[in-house]
Amino acid sequence: MLKKGFKDDQIASIVKMSVYSISVLKYTEVIVNNERIQCQICNQSMKQITWSHLKNEHNITIEKYKELFPNIPTSTPSRINKYRSFKNPNHGKNYEEIYGKEEGDIKRNKITQKQIGRKCPALAGTGITGTRKDTQTFARSTYEANIDRIFIYENKKYADEFTPPNQRFVLKDKNNNITTYQPDRVDLDGLFCKDSFVEVKGYMYPEDWAKINLFREQHKDKKLIVISDDSKFANILYSELKQKYQTLIPLWEDGINNYKTRPDLYKIGYQPDEVTKYLIDNFKNQIHNSITEEHKIFIAKKCINYNKVSKGKKVYIVSVDLIAISNKRAGAHRTSSGVYNYELWEIKTMDGNIFYVTNTTKTVTFHCYDKEYFEKLNIFFKNNCDKNLKYGSKQDWKPTFINSDTWIKASDREKEILKMCNDKIKHYGKKEIIFKVSLNKSEETKRGANFNFEEWNIISKNINNEEKRYILSNFNNATSEYILNQVLQ
């Protein structure tokens, strides 16, 4: 039928096979081969012992047949050899080789347009795909887009995924199966290494690492540089490039500003609708521009994170109002020893919802609650409210229990941790000086909370110059709730 000019779909309807199977047989030439094998149960001659034959004629599975006849093949030798070589006649070819340059460009552009804004699989960096306005190149993630920006910032030429001399390489695995590999970029001018191929990976899957190793084994004349967050695989750590260039490149993409959240900055030809334009003009990071006080912004972010993590919802904060404040617990006489007074804030969102943020459980820990919890929260402040008190920090904070050199040399995040330790040591009535802080371990939360889970080592000295070690950690707690525990020597 093939020789007579029948189409694949016509043949499929006659012989009761799929169009794909006909196509494979057509291109592998198995269909014109006269080799046959015999079914060991009914002695019927055929080119392949299929699951349908075994099920319909003998009511057994392929696995059972192989178990009964372990040394008997289920396909002809030529078919087995063809399938070992390749699974598709076009496998390993680029669009120009299959369709020609003009039609290949049309098909590639159509695919590019479909991919714009599409999210990549989980763990694949930020996975935000599209052609950026500032670089004019297609990138499959924010990582790739930022690497392009580094090339442009350093005035170094590079080739993207679709531009020669970048190309798709044909590789063979240990089972002699053919696969292909396409590097992300080519470093033409030597920003990292002249004429080297560049692979950008936020997360390295095992199959990706296997392809990289196959490429390095089978194309030893080519240099491949891996840029990744994982030091086990990276030639260059992405975090080091980020630390160097993030403040130098205005449109550096991160979790807040990127192709998805700010298409007006990054997307070619983007025109925001009226609602989006209003939000962009009036709400900075989802908080209305009229809210400028640092502590109010801090309270608003608590509400934003609560909706993001607990409800999977994005909210825009219209107002943040203090409705109650106290420096005493209900029925208690001593004032709080924490950084904050006890506060109750009312948050209104653009969609008309109301939330409440308070630290009644612990002065350093603020939680957000839905509207229906108001009566329970307000019991704390019944006959226990003094609007004359200062909200936010009760007084100018000083590193009373921190070594001055340690405080000066600490990074911003270390200073936040040192502040917590300082206040906790003060609260416990200890007389010690902290002189060392270091991060022991850190794990990301599953739902994108404000902080990671962290464990910090704290070393202090008492008045007798004796060292004491503490662990400050929020593991097994809310991410903002850190517990200080002394480690017994």
Image (spheres, grey):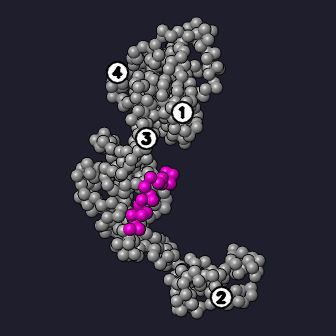
> Which structural element holds mark 4?
helix
> For mark 2, does the 10 Å Cα neighbourhood hold few (<14), some (14 to 19), or many (20 or more) residues?
some
Q: Is residue 234 above or below residue 474?
A: below
Residue appearing at x 36%, y 68% in the figure: 105
Residue appearing at x 36%, y 24% in the figure: 407
- Residue type of the residue flagged with mark 4: Ser
Give the residue number, with chain letter if any, for mark 3: 274
Q: Position of residue 48 (x, y in %)?
A: 63, 84
Give the residue number, with chain letter if any, for mark 4: 404
Quadrant in the picture for residue 399: top left
> Which structural element holds mark 2?
strand
Visible in this render: residue 46?
yes
- The N terminus lies in quadrant: bottom right
C-alpha distance separating marks 4 and 2: 86 Å
> Which structural element holds mark 3?
helix
Choose between 339 and 377: the one closer to the eye: 377
Choose between 298 and 47: the one closer to the eye: 298
C-alpha distance separating marks 3 and 2: 66 Å
Q: Position of residue 314 (x, y in %)?
A: 51, 38
C-alpha distance separating marks 4 and 3: 52 Å
Tell whether position 117 is magenta.
yes
Please report whichever mark, 1 or 4, sits nearer to the chain's N-terminal start: 1
Q: Which residues are magenta?
A: 106-124
> For mark 4, does the 10 Å Cα neighbourhood hold few (<14), some (14 to 19), or many (20 or more) residues?
few
In front of the other: label 1 or label 3? 3
Choose between 461 and 1: the one closer to the eye: 1
Q: Is residue 212 above or below residue 249?
A: below
Quadrant in the picture for residue 362: top right
Please report whichever mark, 3 or 2, sits nearer to the chain's N-terminal start: 2
Q: Position of residue 404 (x, y in %)?
A: 34, 21
Please report whichever mark, 2 or 1, sits nearer to the chain's N-terminal start: 2
In front of the other: label 4 or label 2? 2
